[in-house]
Image: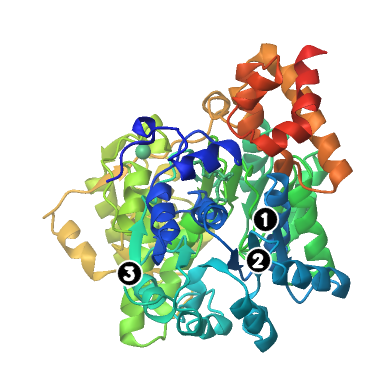
Amino acid sequence: MHPSPETLPADERDAPLRVLRETFGYEAFRGRQREVIDAVTGGRHALALMPTGGGKSLCYQIPALLRNGTAVVVSPLIALMRDQVEALRHYGVRAAYLNSAMDPRDRRECERALAAGELDLLYVAPERLLTDALLATLERIPLALFAIDEAHCVSQWGHDFRPEYMQLGQLAERFPHTPMVALTATADARTRSEILQRLLPAGAETFVASFDRPNIRYRVRLKERARQQLFEFIQDAHPGESGIVYCMTRRATEEVAAWLSERGVRAVPYHAGLSGETREFNQERFLREDGLIVVATVAFGMGIDKPDVRFVVHMDLPKSLEAYYQETGRAGRDGLPSDALLLYGSQDVYRVRAMLESSEADLRHKHAERQRLEALLGFCEQTGCRRQGLLAWFDEAHPGACGNCDNCLEPPETWDATEPARMVLSCIYRTGQRFGANHVIDVLLGSSADRIRRLGHDQLSTYGIGREYPRSVWQSIVRQLLAQGFIRPDPEGHGGLCLAEECRSLLRGERQLVLRRDTRSSRKKRARTGDGASAQIDPADRDDWEALRACRREIADAEGVPPYVVFHDATLLAMLQVRPATLEEMASVSGVGRHKLERYGEAFLRVFNG
Ligand code: ADP
Ligand code: ZN
């Protein structure tokens, strides 16, 4: 363990801390940043596994500034490269990028600056790095380090595989004396060992940070009227803030975006079926405008480095808990409170179960797939701390009671549903294991529908035995029975329900079944979800907050960069607390480094001092 940042002397000898404070304007290192920085600055190789928003960039940017020569950063995301370089220049760091999308004049200038040793950092796409010309240049100049971002792209197993990443292994042979650091937010053991094997020289140290994202509040809600729920959630908790809404289908993204727009919520769709131009345009707007919402399929997100995404909503179940973690992880990179809301209903469970029934993959794959989907359903239905459940899937122990998930904030009621569950099972059995949930519930409720009579189901012993509970309770029971695998969709895919092996013990009365009591959303409850960044602001400070944001927007527009490149929300919030009256006081605000102080200090001071 390294000493805690507070105990470190802030004097000249502590070079990393000095750079952190003077250049980047931050007070202390987070998590394992310091250890990675020390290893790389000391010339060693490292693998850093940190969650999104964990602060991976500083792990190579600070060594880049401390070591002699240029640091070469390999990044697969061209759009992101430009923004990162822009952000670094705003810190007064000499950074540039090379990729295939840039114009030849800029490229020649960059190559000149590189050869002249004028760059602290060079960002480059992997295929460009591996050209003979560039490698030859790099052999002639002093190199501070190689940083390989999104290092999981080397894993053929994951879904972000990039063949060029396989070639990056040759760097270690060609530049044996240059330290290398690989970084990723994908933590599973297999990806980790692939990175170590394929990218890094022997002897690299591995640093694993906690994958907890404490500022993200996880919520799973019963899907009732999904769009209305989404709209009210945005209105109540995140008015005027940026967010991502994930839908399963392309059509849904367009419909939801249009529906929101009609109601005065600015939203644009994003999916792989839109033209490249439209996609780029919408993504660009999302990065640059304050408070725009993107309604997207999972095609959106990789390479979105926007720090102030305040919420991520899933209108449908994600593919897996890994996907859920990655997608929700795009919220709150800046560390400010953010929401993750998942809407989930019987249809989602049915769909997942039906997928499991029909999966034709080979057995081993099927087993893994089954576990994955079971975990996902388990997460949705669980009554304990969601954070604990989520992290457990990544083999990280969390004590629970996080205080920042729906189950911790409003502990769900549970009830002994053994008897009614047995009624459902026996009704499914007696109706021949061919009918869907609605029909089974109709029989239990003693419906007088023609269909029931025609089929003779009004003669069954289970007819009308369930009048004690309303339909919604039966729906809840059926959903949970399905989620827990006591019942399953019929294998022919006709929409019917059958009994699963697991239900025997329940039918025999050998076990008890405790279920979650579903709650319907009510306006009163919703009002309490308001937790966005702007909700943190004292009403008395609201005008100043808006003035700070306006000041930032003006500068950003003039410079043609996204507002967060000027200052993050977290920095504006800190300013609001400090209320600096002098440049010196402004310098003490977290996120205000030397360069930004010179550039913007006066403008922001005027907000407070007229
Ligand atoms: P990652 O690449 O791991 O997703 P970033 O490097 O983009 O994360 O950092 C996430 C955010 O946290 C950025 O806004 C960054 O400026 C901020 N940050 C990183 N390290 C610190 C720190 N030690 N103190 C305060 N803010 C930090
Ligand atoms: Zn919790």
Amino acid type, callout 2: Tyr
On the question of residue 317 being in view, the answer is: no
Give the Cα separation between the discs numbered 2 and 3.
28 Å
Residue topped by disc 3: 189
Viewer-nearest residue: 461 or 557: 557
Task: Report the amino acid beneath label 3.
Answer: Ala
Question: Which of the two discs, 1 and 2, sits closer to the camera?
Answer: 2
- The residue that label 2 is drawn on is 123
Q: Which residue is mark 1?
A: 84
Tell me if residue 249 comes above or below residue 556 in the rendering. below
Question: What SS does tag 3 mark?
Answer: helix
Quadrant showing the C terminus: top right
Q: Residues within 10 Å of mark 1 (few under 14, many from 20)?
A: some
**Is residue 422 shown left or right of residue 377?**
left
Q: Measure how far apart labels 1 and 3 are at the Cα level.
A: 29 Å
Is label 2 in a helix, a strand or a loop? strand
